[in-house]
Amino acid sequence: MRGVLLIAATILGGLALCTAARAAYLEDDDAAEAPARLIVAPRPPRPPRPVPDNPLTRAVRRMSVRRGYSYKGLTVFPVETPHVLDRTDYPSIAEALRRGVLRITEKGTGSVPVLLAENTGDRPILMLAGEMVLGGKQNRILREDLLLPAKSGRLELPVLCVERRRWSGPEAAFKSNTAIAALNVRAAASTHQDQEAVWKGVSDYQAALRVSSPTEDLQAVQDSPEVRKAVADYVEGFRKHWRPDTVGMVVARHGRIVGVDVFCNAALFRKHRDRILESYAVDCYVARRRLRAGGTAWRKLVPDRREAERFLRRTLRAHHEWRATPGAGRLLAVSGAGLRGTGLVYRQALLHASLFAEDQVIMPPVPLPRPILRRSPQRRLE
């Protein structure tokens, strides 16, 4: 009897184990059919974008932006550097013309986008984008920075027309009046915009300043008594703030950064400083007139030095592209990161760079809206 009971218990225990195993198997089946919970691994941090390594970015990294000074809506932040790679005081167009070592003429019977230049001297000549050359069949501006080599022979200069309704004149050589085109026109040339963009900039300045010219000439605008008086006032207003070791400037118009110009050494900056400042001053003066025309009482806005420094540092995040130039060296085109412009490089040294804010170059339309302008907490410096 005890043996029968033992056999029965063993059979029942085996049946129980089989039932439990079957239940567990079915539960596992159900679990497999249920939607699995996905555990997403955290995304690894994106590696920082490498900064392009070229003479422009290396120069910008060494530069420091000083305290800004403001005068009638224009703010200038001096730029300095402790590291100077090229100390050459390259002659300007005006200096070379006075010495008789530079000759600029039409190409053949004339070509709007091209002039011919020859440097017979023994020193390279630094020519800046936006510089005006007057005469020939029509007045032009240089389209890009260019270093004209010593004993160059005849080279082609890329230019843009700033006198729309004239195509006549003697074959006499061009002359320079030392002026640099107003900001919008200069920026259009330096950033390789087309001829229509330049003519539009000239027309905008003429309309804003009510300067009539039968040939729609930018020179007539910048040579008008009103503009000459205004820009002279700006130049004098900033004169006491320049330091001997300044190599460039970051410029703001009514509190917003509009551009940067930096040179390889302080001597070159001093040579071109006032002409470049006049380019910004014409634009700022036009903006003031438009504010008054719109009935807006503007207040003095002064951007922070750190804002100017951040704008200059945008160059490190921008896209850089090398371009050939008719002269010596190479041209580095900059775009993206909210700015655009060019830098001229010669023997691994940055000679000059002009960079412009993408959203601030075009002047506001007329009439202006009535913005709410607030005073900056920074102390005004005029």
Image: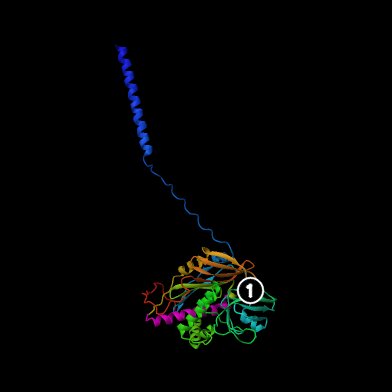
Quarter the C terminus occupies: bottom left
Residue designated by label 1: 147
Magenta extent: 269-296
Dot 1, crowdedness within 10 Å: few (<14), some or many (≥20)? many
87 lies left or right of 23:
right
- Residue 14 is at least partly visible in this image: yes
Q: Main secondary structure of the magenta part?
A: helix
Mark 1, secondary structure of its residue: strand
Q: Which residue is drawn at 54% across and 76% down?
A: 195
Q: Residue at x 51, y 58 (%)?
A: 49
Q: Position of residue 348 (x, y in %)?
A: 62, 66
Q: Quadrant of residue 264?
A: bottom right
- Residue 125 is at least partly visible in this image: no
Q: Where is residue 157 in the image (x, y as percent from the top left)?
A: 62, 76
Measured along the vertical axis of the image, is residue 211 above or below residue 327? Answer: below
Query: Residue type at mark 1?
Result: Leu
266 lies left or right of 21:
right
Of residues 180 and 18, the one drawn nearer to the viewer in this rendering: 18
Quarter the N terminus occupies: top left
Of residues 123 and 176, the one drawn nearer to the viewer in this rendering: 176
